[in-house]
Every structure is written in structure tokens, then in C-alpha cells.
Image: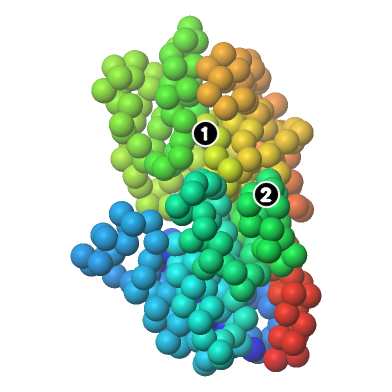
Amino acid sequence: MRILFIPNWRVKHLDEDDKHLQAPDKYVAGKPYWFFKYFPRGTEVDVLDIGDPSLLRKVEKKAKFYVQQPFKAFLRRNDYDLVVSHGAQSGLVYELLASFAKRKPRHLMFDIGGLNGSRINRYETPLIRFALRKSPAIIVHSSRQLDLYRNHYPNLVEKSTFIPFGADFDYFDDEMEINIKKRVLAFGYAKRDFATLCQAFSQINQTEFELHIVGDTRLEPEYGSHANIVFHDKMPISQLMQFIKESAIVAIPLPEYLYSYGQMSFLQSMALRKPLIVTETTSSRDYVSNVHGVRTTRPGDVEDMRQALEEMFAMDKGELLYRGVMNAEYVRNDFNESLMGKRIWDFVKTTFPELANR
């Protein structure tokens, strides 16, 4: 079986493996790519990413959908048995083009952002319905997103499913002894509620723990003067992993949106044996509800966040370490990349049974 994968990010094509890059970000010659390694032996995958930065890319970014990449995929489509798009920014345009063609392979789309940020309005929604009128197969990483289809895109329901995101546990599995610092680490740029976290932390009268925020310095003018709040620019994944390992607690404060975001951040932190504070939202609910090593908070609730921080601060080192180990085992058993890949293949062969023997 031949597959064309069109992700809405850049993928480096390498002759030799680079351990500093995560699996979705690298295509190593002679090795299976990302979760496709769990597909049947002999599966061939070509990756067509969004391309190098350009003026057109800037326009596409503002428009919030890609044109050049899905058009290239459309021209190449008949060399493949299956086209897999990751993100509606690419998948919608490809599906629209393919809907007018007589000859086309099957199309599987990962809807990460709720098609249009889960927005429903009189202008955009009919256009999306038209683009998806042929009903491609769809995978979401947040179960509540399926309600969006039931309520507004009923033709998509039959070939849509929820498959949890899975972290590459082996990539993050490292039992090397680390000097743990009394640090709360929060990281990310887009779709983070650092305002609630900073406000809650600043209300706590303590001098032992520091709050470090990596990747977003927009609140530094307001909170940078606080003695125990430190802001950092975005850093490479290898440096960030070291930062996570050295931190006693990881906090992932999330706003509420009806789609998937932040899942890699909290699952990877759990795989690195960290106790977590995570906002319970549409995106996180399937993963962190009732997990021993995770203290969930309500969206935008400063008082709940403050209480969560104080509860963690009151725990001794042994309890924090135990919660981190429990989180790692939870990811290893229930939310690993292998499970995700196998579930994706099961969905593909069930939805498109003619591909099972290709």
C-alpha cells in the first residue's frame, strides 16, 4: 500500500537519524515514518509537508489554510492508495479539489482544530459542508469533537472516530538521576492560559518554589518583576526536555476550545515522570480525568489553580516522585504511540476494507 501524508508542518528529510527531533518532525531514509511504522509491513509512505517559508506561506498563515501543498497532493493523488492529511488547513482544500475528480484514492483526515476552530456561522460553515460533501474518513483526538459533527456535519459521523493521541514513550523514557529543583514549569505559546497561572502563583505567600514559563514572554511586563516568576524564550526540544526533567511540577494551563491542543505537552511531561497540574478542557478531559498523578483545574479559575499549586507545594519529594512515576506508567500503558498507530490502522482497514490487502 502506498500512502501520501500531508501534514500542516515542516518535516525534515534526513539520511541519518537525528535524536533531537521528534518522530513527526523527521523522515529518515530507509526507516518507517512516525505512527505508520505500526501499519502492515510493506507500507510505503511519502511525506509532502507545507514547504519552506515564503511569501505565499505568510498569506496562507493569515488565511488559516494551505493552498500550494494540497494542490500538489491533488496532482500526485493517483500514485497512491490513500491520502492522509493532518489538519483541516490542508485536508479541506485537498478534499474540495478531490471531490470534483473521478479518479482519486481514499482520504483520511486528522481534524485537530475542529474544522474551523469549531466555529459555526452562516458564511463559513456551508462552505465547509460543501468541501466535505463526499465524507472523507476523519480521526479526532478529543471525543467531544464528534458532537460538532453530529450537530452540524451529520454526513461525517459514520466515518469519523475518536482515537487518543499517543506519545512516543521510548523517546521520553529516561531513568537517569536528575537534580530536581523546586520549580513549576509551564511551556508553550499558543492556546495557554498563563494569565490564570501567573495570577494564582503570585497570590501564594512562599519563597521556595519558582514558576518558569517557557515559550511565551507576553506577560513578562506584568509579572516579570515578581521574584519567583521567570520567563524564557522558546527553546529546542532537547533543552526543554532537560528543563522538564529538572522541574518538580509541570503545569499546563489551558483555555477551553472545542478541539485538540496541548495533548503532546501534558502526555510528554507525564512520560518524563512529572506530576501535573492540567486544566480540564475538551482537549484534556479524555486523558487526565481521575488520574492519580494529575491535579485538574477548572478553566480560568484562579482560586482553583491557586489551591492546586498549594496542594502540590505541600507534598514531600517522595509523593511528587511517586505521582510522576504513576503518570509515566499511565502513558506507557494507555496513551503511547504504538497504541495510537495500531488503532489508526484498525480504523483504516475497517473503513476502507479494500486497502487491507494492498
Q: Position of residue 258 (x, y in %)?
A: 58, 43
Residue 212 position within the rendered picture, expressed as x and y whole percent measured from the top left: 41, 30
Residue position marked by numbered label 2 in the rendering: 151
Q: CA distance from mark 1 to mark 2?
A: 23 Å
Q: Position of residue 138 (x, y in %)?
A: 64, 65
Q: 5 or 241: nearer the eye?
A: 5
Pick the quarter of the image with the N terminus. Answer: bottom right
| Above or below for 242 versus 311 | below
- The residue located at (32%, 62%) in the rendering is 60
Quick check: 305 left or right of 127? right
| Residue count near mark 2 (Cα–Cα under 10 Å), binned few <14, some 14–19, many ≥20 | few
Of the residues shown, which amino acid type is indicated by label 2? Answer: Asn
Q: Quadrant of residue 324?
A: top right
- Numbered disc 2: secondary structure: helix
Q: What is the x, y in percent for residue 148?
A: 64, 49
Earlier in the chain: of badge 1 and badge 2, it is: 2
Task: Say few, some or many: other residues with alpha carbon within 10 Å of mark 1 (under 14 / 14 to 19 / 20 or more).
Answer: some
Q: Can you tell which of label 1 and label 2 is closer to the viewer?
A: 2
Residue type (three-letter) at the residue carrying disc 1: Pro
Q: Is residue 49 visible?
A: yes
- Residue at 56%, 62% (x, y): give it: 129
Relative to 136, does residue 318 appear above or below in the rendering?
A: above
Helix, strand or loop status at disc 1:
loop
Q: Please identify the quarter of the rendering in which residue 163 is found.
A: bottom right
Q: Is residue 170 left or right of residue 27?
A: right
Badge number at residue 255: 1
Foreground pick, 209 / 222:
222
